[in-house]
Amino acid sequence: MKTSRLILVAALAAISLLPAAAQKSKLAGADDSLSYALGVANYKYYVGDSININVKLFSKGMSDASKEKPLMNDTTATAFIVSYMQRREKARLMAEYGEQIEAARIWLAGNAEAEGVVTTPSGLQYRVLREGTGATPGPEDMVKVHYAGKTTDGNQFDSSYDRGEPAEFRVNNVIRGWVEGLQLMKEGSKMMLYIPYDLAYGERGAGNIIKPFETLIFEVELLEVIKDEQLP
């Protein structure tokens, strides 16, 4: 997603052309030329990014802000722009990756029917490989785990087993599917977690293997819930 900083860059780039442009216009002085250039640069920027601009409301927003009587304050306006751009980008990505999203939906629907697989209200799926008997972690707890992660087509992207060393982290510092899954386990438990994209890395993906909207499969073994007194 492009940012407002890029708007300023575009506007500043246009300033370098002002002396020549000023000779062909009726703009009075550098301040008027700059004001006009900023208007041109911002309009061209948004139109170039396929955003429909209502010129009257765009001008009204500038005018109201200059009179300190805007319909939105700075915080509200910025939040709306960010939210709008995020929704727009997500819609674009969902259209681009529509086939993959549908394939993942079908895969998860089929997996939900497999023996021993449980689906939670969030959409997380899990299967217990071994029941533990120890403590169950909370969101603020540190845990020590062994795990291996792969995509639904079998590409492994990470494994603590291969590294020969368990991972340690705080439960609420990982993807949502892990946060939920770990709190369903006890020390000594081993589970398969089947994590839909919205509980994993979302529409962005991660790295070169985890594509946008990717469903992930993890084998997770909870070795230990690390108590505060055990921490350095």
Image: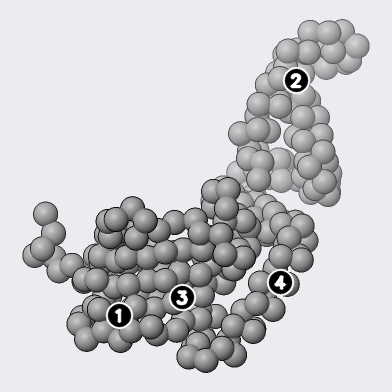
Q: Which of the image's four quarters has the N terminus?
A: top right
In this rendering, the label closer to the viewer, 2 or 4? 4
Residue 193 circle label: 3
Residue type at numbered disc 3 = Leu
- Secondary structure beneath dot 3 equals strand
In the image, which is nearer the foreground, mark 2 or mark 1?
1
**Residue 68: % across, % down:** 60, 44
Of the residues under marks 4 and 1, which one precedes in the sequence? 4
- In contact (CB < 8 Å): disc 3 and disc 4: no
**Marks 3 and 4, the one that precedes in the sequence:** 4
Query: Which residue is more in the foreground, 35 or 84?
Result: 84
Tell me which amino acid carries mark 4.
Answer: Ala
Residues at marks 3 and 4, CA–CA distance in whole angstroms: 18 Å
* SS assignment at label 2: helix
Residue in the picture at 37% in, 71% down: 220
- Between 14 and 155, the one nearer to me in the picture: 155
Three-letter residue code for mark 1: Ser
Q: Give the secondary structure at mark 4.
A: helix
